[in-house]
């Protein structure tokens, strides 16, 4: 926009200056030629007046030569005297007798432009003894237009100056318009990123001020709607707690232990989902999540260590040394829930005594990896169960929670089943300082 405004201003100013300066240039050229012609005409008339009496006497030649030579000089128009017998006196000897000279001998003084360029002023000398003589003053092109270069340079400088001033004013105006537009765009970007407190400052032309006002109204309306949606989701999740609690009580009254265990596991998974809904519904969108993956891994591994020791399991933890953070864009509670799910799956679905390892490392492409690997029998059929699909007593909801935790942070989720056991890897982008 700024460049377009500059180009438009430059083109418009150039057109206006062209329409103004071209006539001025031609007028200056014409004025210079007219001035030089007037001076040459005055010179020719003076010479004709001065040598008129001399040509009427016998001393005509010497006096005429002195008079003509006195008006000739360097950078001056060439002045000649053409006598009636065809001889020439002055700067231009051998001056041909042209039709113009013959016309001047009839008593007419005039100016004409020969084909070779320049101008000639012819003035007849009356009273000559042997007939009419003619004073001829010749102006070259350079003499006609002498002195026009300086005015042309001045006008060119004025034109360039006006163009630069116009461009400067247009640039300031464009900077003001572009700056207001960019600030408006930055406000829209903040709103798109979830910062619903962002508001645009009405500035610039009326149209941009109108857009800024409407954008602020839209942001306020979105904030109101999202607040209402979060409250409704939280209320709905709270209402689900009562039937979930009733389901748990009903499951505990079942006489079949296997059936009671299966239903209780389903109810537990449902409770986790409800808690997840409540937690996400209450979280502000503009909040920037951040958690230290290494610290969470060490803390949760220490939390599960007593249960692992009760089951005769070797629990190993490999993370960067203490004090080295591995920041990832995930809320700490969600990261904790995902890791608890993975460790809980190992403890619930592998034989007692099966060792497992929790590993945290960073990769060369600026990503963090969380891996929970065990040395058990691996996943049934070699693949992790899908969400809601039971496998070895699992609903698959735990792994789905871990998968969504990674993918919502623009990360990845990968499972593998090998002869040495199962492995689940979550990848997260690192948070820049």
Image: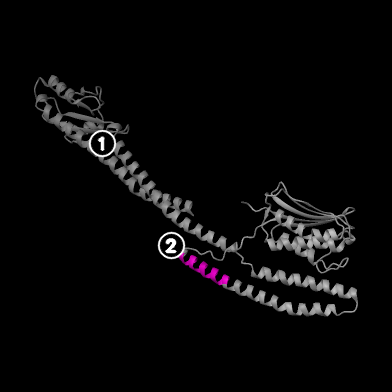
In which image quadrant can residue 160 be found?
Answer: top left
Residue 205's disc is 2
In which image quadrant can residue 277 be found?
Answer: bottom right
Q: Position of residue 410 (x, y in %)?
A: 69, 58
Q: Is residue 353 left or right of residue 207?
A: right
Specify the segment rendered in magenta.
209-223
Crowd tier of the residue under label 1, counting other residues whose Cα lies within 10 Å: few below 14, some 14–19, many 20 or above: few
Q: Tell me which residue sits at (87%, 66%) in the image.
A: 391
Task: Residue 215: say if magenta.
Answer: yes
CA distance for labels 2 and 1: 62 Å
- Tag in front: 2 or 1: 2
Under circle 2, the secondary element is loop
Considering depth in this image, is 166 or 50 the residue closer to the camera? 166
Q: Position of residue 193 (x, y in %)?
A: 60, 61
Q: Tell me which residue sits at (14%, 31%) in the image.
A: 46
Considering depth in this image, is 65 or 278 the residue closer to the camera? 278
Q: Is residue 245 visible?
A: yes
Residue 112's disc is 1
Under circle 1, the secondary element is strand
Circle nearer the N terminus (2, 1): 1
Q: Position of residue 194 (x, y in %)?
A: 60, 64
């Amino acid at each position: 926009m700024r460049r377009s405004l500059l180009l438009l201003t430059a083109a418009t100013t150039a057109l206006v200056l062209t329409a103004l300066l071209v006539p001025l240039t031609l007028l200056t050229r014409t004025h210079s030629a007219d001035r030089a012609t007037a001076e040459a005409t005055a010179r020719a008339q003076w010479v004709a007046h001065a040598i008129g009496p001399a040509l009427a006497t016998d001393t005509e030649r010497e006096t005429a030569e002195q008079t003509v030579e006195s008006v000739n000089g360097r950078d001056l128009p060439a002045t000649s005297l053409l006598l009636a017998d065809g001889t020439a006196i002055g700067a231009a000897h051998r001056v041909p007798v042209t039709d113009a000279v013959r016309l001047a001998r009839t008593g007419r003084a005039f100016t004409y432009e020969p084909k070779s360029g320049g101008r000639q002023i012819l003035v007849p000398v009356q009273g000559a003894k042997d007939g009419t003589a003619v004073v001829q003053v010749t102006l070259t092109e350079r003499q006609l237009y002498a002195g026009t270069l300086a005015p042309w340079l001045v006008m060119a400088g004025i034109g360039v100056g006006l163009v630069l001033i116009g461009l400067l004013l247009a640039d300031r105006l464009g900077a003001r318009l572009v700056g207001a537009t960019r600030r408006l765009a930055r406000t829209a970007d903040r709103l798109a990123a979830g910062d619903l407190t962002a508001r645009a400052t009405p500035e610039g032309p009326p149209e941009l001020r109108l857009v800024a006002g409407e954008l602020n109204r839209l942001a306020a309306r979105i904030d109101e709607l999202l607040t209402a949606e979060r409250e409704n989701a939280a209320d709905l999740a709270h209402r689900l707690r009562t039937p979930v609690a009733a389901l748990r009580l009903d499951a505990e009254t079942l006489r079949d232990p296997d059936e009671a265990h299966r239903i209780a596991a389903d109810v537990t998974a449902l409770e986790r989902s409800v808690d997840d809904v409540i937690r996400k519904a209450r979280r502000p969108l503009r909040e920037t999540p951040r958690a230290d993956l290494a610290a969470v891994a060490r803390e949760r591994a220490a939390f599960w260590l007593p249960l692992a020791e009760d089951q005769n399991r070797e629990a190993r933890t490999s993370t960067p040394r203490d004090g080295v953070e591995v920041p990832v864009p995930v809320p700490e509670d969600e990261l904790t829930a995902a890791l608890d799910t993975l460790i809980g799956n190992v403890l619930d679905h592998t034989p007692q005594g099966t060792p497992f390892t929790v590993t945290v490392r960073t990769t060369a492409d600026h990503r963090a990896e969380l891996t929970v690997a065990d040395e058990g029998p691996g996943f049934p059929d070699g693949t992790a169960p899908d969400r809601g699909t039971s496998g070895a007593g699992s609903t698959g909801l735990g792994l789905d929670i871990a998968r969504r935790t990674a993918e919502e942070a623009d990360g990845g989720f990968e499972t593998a089943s090998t002869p040495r056991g199962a492995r689940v890897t979550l990848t997260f982008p690192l948070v820049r300082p």
